[in-house]
Image: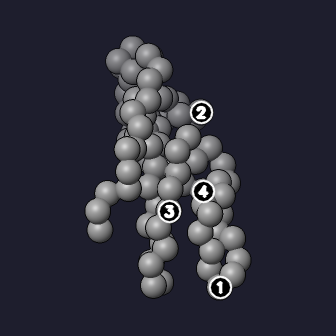
């Protein structure tokens, strides 16, 4: 999964690739972006590497409906981080 960060001053911006929704492991949500656990960023804070964990999801979905609508796998890519 694509993750990109941008550190400027004291703000860390995290950019994730949005993908087709997939039912979460709990079956309660649709995951649309994730780092799939700890992800290195290439960014540093006071000389130390920054690692992030992030998930983006749609809450409280009807999972039976969601499974039928979003059963295909696919992924859109983030071409570049958006302009600030």
Identify the residue under disc 4: 53
Identify the residue under disc 3: 5
Residue 21 visible, this angle: no
In the picture, measured across the screen, residue 24 lies left or right of residue 60, that is right
Q: Secondary structure at mark 3?
A: strand
Q: Secondary structure at mark 1?
A: loop
Q: Nearer the viewer, mark 2 or mark 1?
A: 1
Identify the residue under disc 2: 25
Vertical order, 10 against 39 (above or below): below
* Residue 26: quadrant of the picture: top right
Identify the residue under disc 1: 46
Q: State which tag comes first along the sequence, 4 or 1.
A: 1
**Is the residue under label 2 in contact with that under label 3 (CB below 8 Å)?**
no
Distance between the alpha carbons at the discs numbered 4 and 2 = 17 Å
Total label count?
4
Distance between the alpha carbons at the discs numbered 2 and 1 = 36 Å
**Which of 79 and 22 lies nearest the eye of the viewer?**
79
Q: State which tag comes first along the sequence, 2 or 1.
A: 2
The outermost residue toward the front is 80
Q: Position of residue 20 (x, y in %)?
A: 40, 29
Q: Residue at x 59, y 33 (%)?
A: 25
* Residue 63: quadrant of the picture: top left
Q: State which tag comes first along the sequence, 4 or 3.
A: 3
**Which of 69 and 84 lies nearest the eye of the viewer?**
84
Task: Please state, as top left, top right, bottom left or bottom right, where the C terminus lies in the image.
Answer: bottom left
Vertical order, 11 against 55 (above or below): below
Distance between the alpha carbons at the discs numbered 4 and 1 = 20 Å
Q: State which tag comes first along the sequence, 4 or 2.
A: 2
Q: Residue at x 60, y 60 (%)?
A: 41
Q: Position of residue 59 (x, y in %)?
A: 39, 43
Q: Nearer the viewer, mark 4 or mark 3?
A: 3
């Amino acid at each position: 999964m694509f993750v990109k960060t941008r550190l400027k001053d004291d703000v860390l911006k995290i950019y994730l690739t949005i993908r087709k929704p997939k039912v979460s492991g709990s079956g309660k949500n649709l995951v649309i972006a994730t780092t799939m656990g700890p992800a290195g960023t290439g960014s540093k804070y006071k000389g130390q590497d920054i690692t992030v964990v992030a998930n983006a999801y749609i809450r409280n979905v009807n999972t039976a409906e969601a499974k039928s609508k979003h059963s295909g796998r696919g992924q859109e890519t983030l071409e570049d981080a958006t302009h600030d």
